[in-house]
């Protein structure tokens, strides 16, 4: 499991930097999940598979048009409709139901998306033939892909914008009010169903954007959703619904552990450090590292 020859300072430095890049992307993907869970109070186990199928759409559009920006805009438009449709057709009917019902419905949706991807693409990984910035950047003694720098910057900027949305905009403040007390929000004249649909759709759009960024640095296969779904739930649990800052910090922790695990452990054991960190955190701080409630 261990690879002792990999223990050297340049490897650790590269691992930490790559881990921070991964962590920023994980944070963005987890933010959509946290937003939906925090406002709608629904356990969405299809979250990772939505990211996976979004990645395939990005791949197909970019392959057919040769333009990654068209792929992004097309995916956002398609999944805005998809998010609103899933909310009205599925999620709306399980709000407030027992957690087991919510889990069964969302797991079923995730399995449909995963099997659809298997039927269309089989289990072969697919990657973009060309990415936005396919050249290296030197940062001191480290060499980093320009794509990774782009992914990190965009992810952090979007996380900051989500924080601004939730704390400074009318819709964001209404969403927080609904999350705190749905009945009181009704009495104050807030359109709760509209807030629920808007929040779910925004969460899906954040996930779609994370899928676009992922395709700049990695491939997609039908099982990508399982990996991302689990990582996102771990980050949300570590963050403890402590706001955007908690999600970002938890994303960085998981990203660095993931990257270092890839260097020092075999592929079958690289997730062990993050699972250990998750178990210890939940054991000693059940509300998460940054949890408010």
Image (cartoon, helix red, strand yellow):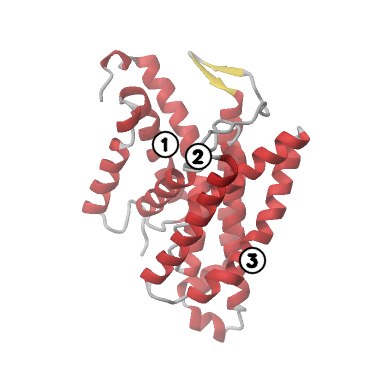
Which residue occupies 48% across, 46% down?
Answer: 225
Q: Could you tell me residue 224's position as x and y percent?
A: 48, 42
The one nearer the camera, 193 or 106, is 106
Q: Residue at x 58, y 56 (%)?
A: 204
Q: Quadrant of residue 191?
A: bottom right
- Where 150 falls versus 247 (above or below)? above
Crowding near the residue tagged with mark 1, few <14, some 14–19, many ≥20 C-alpha atoms within 10 Å: many
Residue at mark 1: 255
Kindly report the distance in space between the C-alpha atoms of the residues bearing marks 1 and 3: 32 Å
Q: Is residue 64 visible?
A: yes
Under circle 3, the secondary element is helix
Q: Nearer the viewer, mark 3 or mark 2?
A: 3
Looking at the image, residue 131 lies above or below residue 141? below
Disc 3/disc 2 C-alpha distance (Å): 29 Å
Write down the residue under mark 3: 85
Could you tell me residue 239's position as x and y percent? 39, 52
Relative to 49, 129 lies left or right: right
Give how far across and how far down residue 218 sits, in percent: 54, 32
Between 211 and 112, the one lying in front of the other is 112
Q: Quadrant of the C terminus?
A: bottom left
Name the one closer to the observer, 273 or 117: 117
């Amino acid at each position: 499991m261990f690879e002792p020859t990999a223990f050297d300072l340049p490897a650790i430095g590269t691992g930490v930097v790559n881990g921070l890049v991964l962590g920023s992307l994980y944070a963005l993907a987890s933010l959509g999940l946290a937003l939906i869970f925090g406002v709608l109070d629904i356990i969405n186990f299809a979250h990772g598979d939505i990211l996976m199928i979004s990645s395939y759409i990005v791949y197909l559009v970019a392959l057919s048009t040769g333009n990654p920006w068209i792929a992004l805009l097309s995916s956002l438009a398609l999944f805005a409709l998809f998010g609103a449709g899933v909310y009205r057709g599925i999620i709306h009917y399980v709000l407030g139901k027992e957690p087991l019902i919510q889990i069964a419905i969302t797991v079923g949706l995730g399995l449909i998306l995963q099997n659809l991807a298997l039927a269309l693409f089989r289990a072969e990984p697919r990657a973009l033939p060309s990415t936005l910035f396919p050249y290296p950047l030197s940062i001191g003694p480290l060499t980093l892909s320009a794509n990774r720098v782009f992914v990190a910057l965009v992810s952090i900027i979007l996380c900051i914008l989500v924080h601004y949305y939730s704390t400074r905009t009318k819709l964001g403040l209404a969403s927080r009010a609904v999350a705190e007390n749905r009945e009181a929000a009704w009495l104050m004249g807030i359109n709760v169903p509209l807030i629920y649909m808007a929040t779910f759709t925004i969460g899906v759009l954040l996930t779609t954007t994370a899928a676009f960024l992922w395709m700049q640095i990695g491939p997609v296969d039908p099982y990508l959703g399982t990996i991302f779904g689990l990582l996102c739930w771990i980050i949300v649990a570590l963050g403890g619904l402590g706001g955007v800052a908690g999600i970002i910090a938890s994303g960085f922790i998981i990203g660095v552990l993931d990257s270092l695990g890839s260097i020092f452990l075999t592929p079958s054991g690289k997730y062990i450090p993050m699972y250990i960190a998750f178990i210890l955190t939940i054991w000693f701080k059940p509300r998460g590292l940054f949890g408010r409630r």
